[in-house]
Image (tube, rainbow, N blue to C red):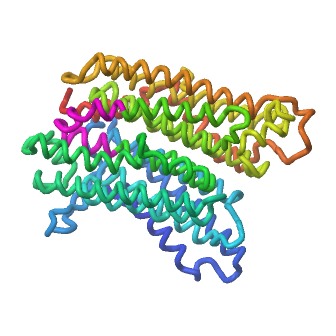
Amino acid sequence: MNAVLIALLLLPLVGAAATLLPSLFGQDEQSAGRRALYLGVAVTGGTLLLAIALAAGFDRGHSARMQAVTDVSWIPALNVRLHLGVDGISLPLLLLTTLLTFLCAIYSLRRLPDAPGTPGPRAYTGLLLLLESGMLGTFAVLDLLLFFLAFEVVLIPMYFLIARWGGENRGPAATRFILYTLLGSAIMLLGFLLLGLHAGTFDMTALAQRHGRGLSHTTQVLAVLAIGLGLAVKAPMWPFHSWLPDAHTAAPTTGSVLLAGVLLKMGTYGFVRILLPSAPGGMATLAPYLAAFAVVGIIYGSLACLALVRPGAKGDLKRIIAYSSVGHMGFVLLGIATLTPTGVNGALFANIAHGLVTGLLFFLVGAIKDRHGTADLDRLAALGKGSGAALYGRAPRLGGLLAFAAVASLGLPGLAGFWGELLAMFGSFQPAAGLSRPTYLVFMALAGLGTLLTAGYLLGVVRRVCMGDPAAAPATDFSDVQTYELAAWTPLVALTLVAGLWPAVLLGLSNPAVKALLGGS
């Protein structure tokens, strides 16, 4: 299985390199562009099949143990090793990454942005595959410096996807994205060096097995501060989130799907994979502060969305979903900050659920924007003379899917969004020993309030976009779901239902691994 994992990481990288060879695509520009897009579908499809093969060969009975392991020396002078492996925490994220990238490649066959001056499909495909390679590497490497390298690889392709294929204000949005994340990454690298040099190893499994032994409390606190800051920017945790709404609003549809569905998970994954097991003393000291920031993010994100949903606010649907991500990722960070198996399992479940549901939401909003040329709520409502865009009457399948994704995002029981947030609050109800239970009960109550606010703004979006009088609307192109859209969206709908009705499919994988990372608690 280690050969399967290596092929999983190399295939998109080889595909990206192939896009640099003009001889593979011919001289005709239009035909070359189509061949490049089909290459993207083939490579991402092959990568998804490899991920499924990896999952099929994974020993679920020993999900706490690293499997498909490769461990060879890479840079002996720095004691850096090419160490790869997967367990019950990283496997679902690998599957999510390959699935979303494949669906984005399918969607791009028909909906690749084609503005004047935009680079061709060959450049787009190369960047998409390079982005996938970096995302997969982040979840598969087990060395701190390799993790940093993979963590950084994703920044350049995402920057160009926003800056060259994005919409209005794409340049400033892409610049803010790259500056925020690079600054956070620089501080994170200092934390990695502090942790690795004091521990005598950069190997993440060795650090996890030591569980902080040999590291002073001060070293652990400083490592958590430095590494946590870089991870918090990517998560994104309030108040380091301000790059996100602009990036999502300007990004093309596929860029928004991958940014929300995968890139945000890289930050929270780092908290679980690196900080919880390697610096438990530092995490215990700073966990209440992490929980406080998380809860502020939950409330802030919900209030920002409520302000954007009200009539006259000129709220952009993509911006609303971006702010909602701040709130949803707040639940993930709250679960991690409880330092309990219940809370951390909830955080990991919420990670996957958010990737599925928010990926679907961005696909749907992109479809609405493609049809009408805007995602502005006020302009959409004007289609129905101010009573709503009447999507139910004009494109009932599109409207039904939007309503489905909205109620999944607000945490309706039976859908994927429910379990992660519930378990994060359960973890707050009984946090780890040494944490103040009254304080965490306040955090739990505020998080519960956040779920009510979330329901308020998402139902407001459904009312203003889906309801209204279709007879009062002017004749505009609001065609219903197309075949290529159905192909890209159906897997997300199905998995949202499966995860909601059968949560053990994820929790059974993550729970043993989480207990091992927390020291066997």
- Magenta stretch contains residue 272: yes
Q: Which picture quadrant has residue 163?
A: bottom right
Q: Is residue 191 left or right of residue 490?
A: left
Position of residue 239 measured from the top left corner of the image (x, y, whole percent)? 42, 42
Above or below residue 28? Residue 386 is above
**Which residue sits furthest left?**
214
Count of numbered circles in the view: 0
Position of residue 233 measured from the top left corner of the image (x, y, whole percent)? 39, 48
Front position in the image: 166 or 127: 166
Q: Principal SS element in the magenta part? A: helix
Q: Which quadrant does the C terminus fall into?
A: top left
Position of residue 137 measured from the top left corner of the image (x, y, whole percent)? 37, 56
**Which residue sits furthest front?**
312
Q: Is residue 32 left or right of residue 453?
A: right
Front position in the image: 315 or 49: 315
Residue 469 in sight in this render: yes
Position of residue 467 measured from the top left corner of the image (x, y, whole percent)? 79, 29
Q: Is residue 447 left or right of residue 63?
A: right
Front position in the image: 177 or 252: 177
Q: Residue at x 28, y 26 (%)?
A: 340
Magenta residue span: 270-292
Q: Residue at x 28, y 35 (%)?
A: 513
Above or below residue 1? Residue 452 is above
Q: Residue at x 57, y 71 (%)?
A: 123
Residue 8 in sight in this render: no
- Magenta stretch contains residue 399: no
